[in-house]
Amino acid sequence: MQQIINFLLRNKNSLLYAFLFFIALVFTINSRTFHQSKFFNSANWVSGNLYTFSSNISGYFGLKEDNLELVAENERLRRLLFNREMTDTVTLDSSLNRYDVVSGRVIKNSFSGPRNYITINKGSNDGLTQDMGVISPNGILGIVENTSANFATVQSILNTKSNINAKLKGTDYFGSLTWNTQDYNTVQLVDIPRLAPIAVGDTIVTGSMSNIFPEHIPIGTITAFELTASESFYEIEVRLFNDMGNLRQVYIIKDRLKSEIEELQSKTENAQ
Amino acid sequence: MRNNEQLQIIVRFLALLFAQFLIFNRMDFMGFINPMVYLLFLYWFPIKERPAALLLWSFGLGLLIDLFSDTMAIHTAAILTAAFFRPAIMRFCFGVNYEFQSFKLSQTTKAQKITYLGLLIVVHHIVFFALEAFGWSHFFSISKKVLATALATLVICLLLISLLGRDKS
């Protein structure tokens, strides 16, 4: 007994180190539960407000670019609006629309690690919940992972855990959008069947298989592609329309029918 | 005197925490280089304090930085390891006399200081980037990141030391 106590006393620093390191490892490996806990992410009250404070200051330096970007988006939307075929009935009741959009601002962005998260200044008070899609004026950004009252963290598409349904514009060949951590402006589209007609420069948009994003949101253009080892699928390099290092204004997409779709799908799966 | 030292530790703790997540986490120089200046906390931590105190302080600092940068607990694991190896690194750089009461960091030569800081940074960065990649499968990309970031951290830390350090003889 004496020897055990002596051993513990002699090695108390090593044991303390081992214990604390073990805690850190558990947090890292159980990252999902760790990250989804209410406190341990940058959407908590303290860091959210600190990041808002700093982004309020640094925001002034990008006002001109932000304005130009928003004007360009308005121009694009107006072009769509004016060229739309007029229908004879117009729905006035906005509660019948499927999608609702909330605007937000990026208060913390990261893109240098393999698992990046973005923090935005809208939270559960604004109706945000987990698994809502987030887009910027130019293309998709990620999926809401965690919310607090006034803030939310977004799992960026630059995250090795990210997996988003995407397809070739104008066709119905769809695959999964992943990221290999190499370049923050390039993501990979995998599982596109060999039959698909693809060429460098083609546009990639979100697919219809996901309950998170509406169809046809732009993602990027193809810069290179090759067949995988099995020669039945393409692996495609996609250059993003977004500049992921320079994000400010974002839109969060709420899908009114999402719970209905998910309920139906889980019912079908459970019935089997 | 002792209170003064504790206060100094707390001020450094907060200053390095804020500097790290408000300024240096956003540098993204060449797309991936973010100098980790909070390692200066280890560099400046009083030698006379118990090693257990250093471990606990480092754990707290690492955890807060992780919390602000959404990086699970890899900063924590890395700074803990560097803190654990600090006595060994000091013995390597300054010889056995660093354990004496009269030893002062400011009395050592420049080369000794740089080696001391450099070794802390290297230990920290190896653990950090290995954990970040979850293994050694991306060995080359890890080594590239370790080398580039370590160099940036070293330069920035040396600048901060010469700017803020008190060189009392």
Image (cartoon, coloured by chain):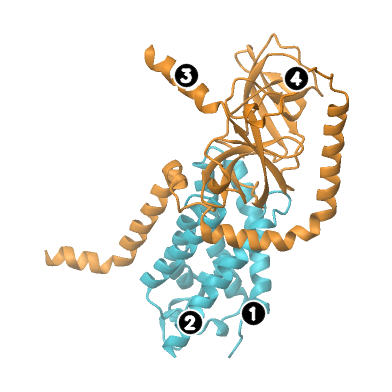
Chain colours: A orange, B cyan
Q: Chain of mark 4?
A: A
Identify the residue position indicated by label 1 in the image. Answer: B164
Alpha-carbon distance for marks 3 and 2? 60 Å
Where residue A253 appears, x then y in whole percent? 64, 35
B7 relative to A208 in the view: left or right: left
Separation (CA) of disc 4 from disc 2? 61 Å
- Three-letter amino acid code of the residue under disc 4: Lys
Report the front residue among A164 and A83: A83
The residue beneath circle 2 is B7
Vertical placement of residue A201 versus B135, above or below: above
Q: Residue at x 64, y 59 (%)?
A: A52
Disc 2 marks a residue whose amino acid type is: Leu
Disc marking residue A169: 4
Q: Nearer the viewer, mark 1 or mark 2?
A: 2
Secondary element at tag 4: loop
Label 1 SS? helix
Q: Name the residue: 45% across, 59% down.
A: B81
Q: Secondary structure at mark 2?
A: helix
- Placement of B148 over or under B1, stated as above or below: above
Mark 1 vs mark 3: in front: 3
Which of the two residues, A128 or B47, is positioned nearer the viewer here?
A128
- Comparing labels 1 and 4, the label whose residue is closer to the camera: 4
Kindly indicate whether the residues beneath marks 1 and 3 are on one polypeptide chain: no
